[in-house]
């Protein structure tokens, strides 16, 4: 394991294989759409690794191994989006190709993220925050000035997948777009641009 000491915490590169996602849930897609609501208050209860695995697969999981296609559509199948998970035991990057997470920071950064997002208590209260980020240059290389639109569309597809999957798992969430971009990047040591923060947990 590689540790890099930096101001604000210890960086570590450690891959954790996630459980295989399920392909059949307990409720129908129609029920998940009907029941989905934005929830901003969560019980003090951690999510399981299986639940986190399912949420990340819904966001960006590989659904066609031969072509590398993922669970959400992407313009030109370029996939400029990177998903991060912020929880009490660290900051993790989702690696779709291996369905694993890579621990980047071993500290609880939820309060840092809370401060960067206008003090929205939902972010520090939720057991996990899913952060959707993008490298616009990837899409710009093919689509030029249309990249902003295409990346935003892709992030929206991913967010809806996450929220419906959360509902199907008996969880709740809320998509948040109100934050200071540069402060979020600083809080999570990111180079890519944040688009969404989605707290997920058990509704209180």
Image (cartoon, grey):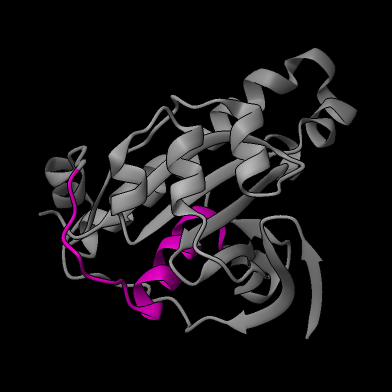
Front-lying residue, 124 or 204: 124
Magenta-highlighted residues: 41-61
Q: Position of residue 110 (x, y in %)?
A: 45, 53
Query: Could you tell me which residue is drawn at 40 percent across and 44 percent down?
Result: 198
Quarter-wise, where is residue 60 in the image?
Answer: bottom right
Q: Can residue 67 be seen at all in this image of the molecule? A: yes
Query: Could you tell me which residue is drawn at 79 percent across and 32 percent down?
Result: 139
Quarter-wise, where is residue 55 in the image?
Answer: bottom left
Is residue 67 depicted above or below 152 in this figure? below
Q: Quadrant of the C terminus?
A: bottom left
Q: Is residue 32 left or right of residue 7?
A: left
Q: Can residue 74 be seen at all in this image of the molecule? A: no
Q: Is residue 203 left or right of residue 193?
A: left
Quarter-wise, where is residue 155 in the image?
Answer: top right
Q: Position of residue 179 (x, y in %)?
A: 49, 27
Q: Position of residue 108 (x, y in %)?
A: 49, 63
- Residue projecting furthest to the right: 141
Q: Is residue 54 magenta?
A: yes
Query: Could you tell me which residue is drawn at 13 percent across and 41 percent down?
Result: 34
Is residue 100 depicted above or below 17 in this figure? above
Q: Is residue 56 magenta?
A: yes
Q: Position of residue 129 (x, y in %)?
A: 42, 52
């Amino acid at each position: 394991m590689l540790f890099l000491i930096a101001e604000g915490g210890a960086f570590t590169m450690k891959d954790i294989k996630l459980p295989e996602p399920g392909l059949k849930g307990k409720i129908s897609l129609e029920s998940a759409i009907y029941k989905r609501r934005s929830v901003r208050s969560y019980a003090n209860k951690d999510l399981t690794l299986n639940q986190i695995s399912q949420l990340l697969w819904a966001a960006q999981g590989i659904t066609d191994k031969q072509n590398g296609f993922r669970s959400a559509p992407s313009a030109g199948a370029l996939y400029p989006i990177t998903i991060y998970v912020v929880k009490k035991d660290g900051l993790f990057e989702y690696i779709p190709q291996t369905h694993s997470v890579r621990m980047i920071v071993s500290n609880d950064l939820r309060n840092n993220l809370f401060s960067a997002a206008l003090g929205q208590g939902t972010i520090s209260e939720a057991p996990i925050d899913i952060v959707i980020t993008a490298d616009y240059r990837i899409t710009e290389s093919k689509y030029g000035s249309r990249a902003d639109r295409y990346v935003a569309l892709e992030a929206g597809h991913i967010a809806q997948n996450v929220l419906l999957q959360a509902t199907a798992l008996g969880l709740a969430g809320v998509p948040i777009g109100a934050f200071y971009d540069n402060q979020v990047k600083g809080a999570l040591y990111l180079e890519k641009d944040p688009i969404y923060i989605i707290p997920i947990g058990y509704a209180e």
